[in-house]
């Protein structure tokens, strides 16, 4: 039995040896190109493409431009204003009335047919639809003295009817406390209205072609508000009328 086992093992070894000697294995050497490619892949680092962020420049029109804060120079009373600082506030001049014995000048207003005298130092401005007689001072300041214009086209032109209709008309202008009195001058008759806010006197002179209106500022009134000071009375006494001519 042992002999047969040894024999079988010997035969198995001979069979393996004979198979190994009969089978040849061909080894294919790698090509130079493949080697170079492999070396290149082994030595070259992997490059990751860089991604640049997209920057969009939007319009700055909706964003307000910051304004630099400027601290104004402090104006010290009694000292000159530093360069670049604000000018110190100066109060407006105090206007007074000249003496009635001052020099006078005649002015004619053709569009309304009125002629009158005022102190020669006063200035006449022609505004749209109105003449303004003012006194001027330094710094561009001025004060009104007299206005001359026309009005009330919707009211009657005869004096009694005009005076009767004037009261309701003034109420529409919020002059409920106005005092209406007759007035007259050189060749004319009209209506005087006292007691209106911020006005000394208004004189209405109705005629068939136009209603003239002359307004006196408060400085021309006495303290009682129902009489003119001597200077204002002289202006009123100088009023003359004539047929209007020309247009504004």
Image (spheres, rainbow, N blue to C red):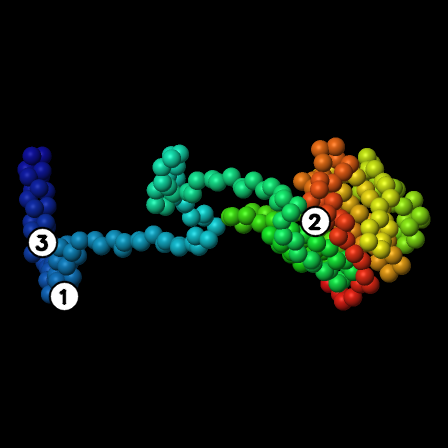
Q: Which residue is mark 2?
A: 146
Q: Residue at x 63, y 44 (%)?
A: 99
Rendering coords of residue 107 (x, y %)? 69, 58
Q: Residue 20 got which mark?
A: 3
Residue 111 figure quarter:
bottom right
Question: Which residue is at the front of the view, 156 or 205?
Answer: 205
Q: State how many labels appear.
A: 3
Ranked by sequence position, the earlier of labels 1 and 3 is 3
Q: Is residue 96 left or right of residue 40?
A: right
Ranked by sequence position, the earlier of labels 1 and 2 is 1
Residue 167 in the image: above or below residue 15: above
Q: Is residue 45 left or right of residue 240?
A: left
Asked if labels 2 and 3 touch by Cβ distance under 8 angstroms, the answer is no
Asked if labels 3 and 1 touch by Cβ distance under 8 angstroms, the answer is no
CA separation in Å, label 1 and label 2: 114 Å
CA separation in Å, label 3 and label 2: 142 Å
Q: Which residue is mark 1?
A: 33
Q: Residue at x 55, y 48 (%)?
A: 137
Rendering coords of residue 231 (x, y %)? 69, 44
Q: Residues within 10 Å of mark 2 (few under 14, many from 20)?
A: many
The mark lying in front, picked from 3 and 2, is 2
Rendering coords of residue 153 (x, y %)? 85, 55
CA separation in Å, label 1 and label 3: 34 Å
The mark lying in front, picked from 1 and 3, is 1
Residue 36 in the image: above or below residue 218: below
């Amino acid at each position: 039995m042992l002999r047969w086992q040894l024999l079988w093992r010997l035969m198995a070894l001979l069979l393996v040896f004979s198979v190994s000697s009969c089978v040849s294995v061909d080894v294919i050497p790698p090509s130079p190109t493949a080697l170079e490619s492999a070396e290149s892949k082994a030595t070259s680092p992997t490059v990751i493409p860089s991604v640049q962020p997209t920057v969009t420049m939007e319009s700055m029109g909706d964003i307000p431009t910051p304004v630099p804060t400027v601290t104004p120079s402090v104006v010290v009373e009694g000292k000159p204003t530093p360069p670049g600082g604000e000018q110190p506030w100066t109060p407006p001049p105090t206007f007074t009335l000249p003496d009635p014995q001052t020099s006078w000048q005649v002015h004619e207003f053709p569009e309304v047919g009125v002629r009158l005298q005022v102190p020669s130092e006063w200035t006449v401005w022609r505004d749209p639809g109105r003449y303004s007689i003012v006194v001027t001072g330094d710094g561009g300041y001025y004060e009104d003295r007299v206005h001359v214009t026309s009005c009330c086209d919707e009211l009657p032109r005869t004096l009694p009817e005009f005076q009767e209709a004037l009261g309701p008309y003034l109420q529409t202008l919020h002059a409920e406390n106005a005092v209406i009195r007759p007035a007259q001058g050189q060749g004319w008759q009209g209506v005087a209205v006292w007691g209106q806010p911020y006005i000394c006197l208004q004189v209405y002179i109705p005629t068939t072609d136009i209603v003239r209106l002359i307004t006196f500022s408060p400085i021309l009134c006495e303290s009682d508000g129902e009489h003119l000071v001597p200077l204002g009375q002289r202006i009123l006494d100088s009023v003359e009328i004539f047929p209007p001519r020309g247009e504004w």
